[in-house]
Image: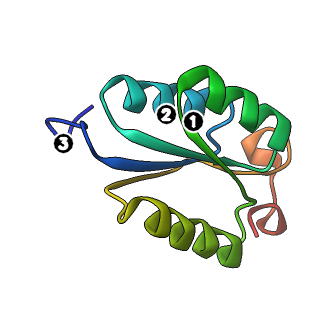
Amino acid sequence: MAGFSDFSGRVAVVTGGASGIGKALAARLVAEGATAVIADNDADLLATTAKDIGATSYVVDVRAAAVQQLADWTVGEFGRVDFVADNAGVGPLAPFDELTHDDFR
């Protein structure tokens, strides 16, 4: 991971952290010494993942108000945020060239 030479003691937030790329990123951050807050809308999977990788979980969807609450909670719990991976996303499963502007909205 480029950018920081040492993640020890850093606070990282990863949205979409219960599975896939977000889970892998959060696991790596924990392995590198960071405190990782993983956020996801799947509460059961999130709790399992957090326990498995040693992260802190926070149930959230990716609407602006909910993400602000995540930020406020994280700062309240840990005093700061050093790194954010905005990995969460939703959308239709379709070939890119079949997506419409409404799909992106």
In the image, what residue occupies the spot 70% across and 62% down? 62
Residue at the image point whose x is 37% and y is 22% from the top: 31
- The Cα–Cα distance between marks 2 and 3, rounded to whole angstroms, is 15 Å
The type of residue carrying mark 1 is Gly
Res 102 → quadrant: bottom right
Q: Do the residues under discs 1 and 2 have CB atoms within 8 angstroms? A: yes
Q: SS at mark 1?
A: helix
Q: Where is residue 16 shown, x and y percent of the image?
A: 65, 44
Label 1, on which residue? 22
- Which residue in the rendered view is the most extreme toward the front? 77
> How many angstroms separate mark 1 from mark 2 (CA)?
6 Å
**Is residue 4 left or right of 29 when viewed as pictured?**
left
Check disc 3 and report its element: helix, strand or loop.
loop
- Find residue 44 and report its horizontal and vertical position in percent: 84, 36
- Where is residue 34, by image quadrant? top left
The amino acid marked with disc number 2 is Ala
Viewport quadrant of the N terminus: top left
Q: Can you tell which of label 1 and label 2 is closer to the viewer?
A: 2
Q: Which residue is mark 3?
A: 4
Relative depth, front residue between 58 and 77: 77
Q: Position of residue 55 (x, y in %)?
A: 54, 35
Q: Secondary structure at mark 2?
A: helix
User: Counting other residues with Cα less than 10 Å from the Cα at mark 1, is it few (<14), some (14-19), or many (20 or more)?
Assistant: many
Q: Residues within 10 Å of mark 3 (few under 14, many from 20)?
A: few
Residue 26 is labelled as 2
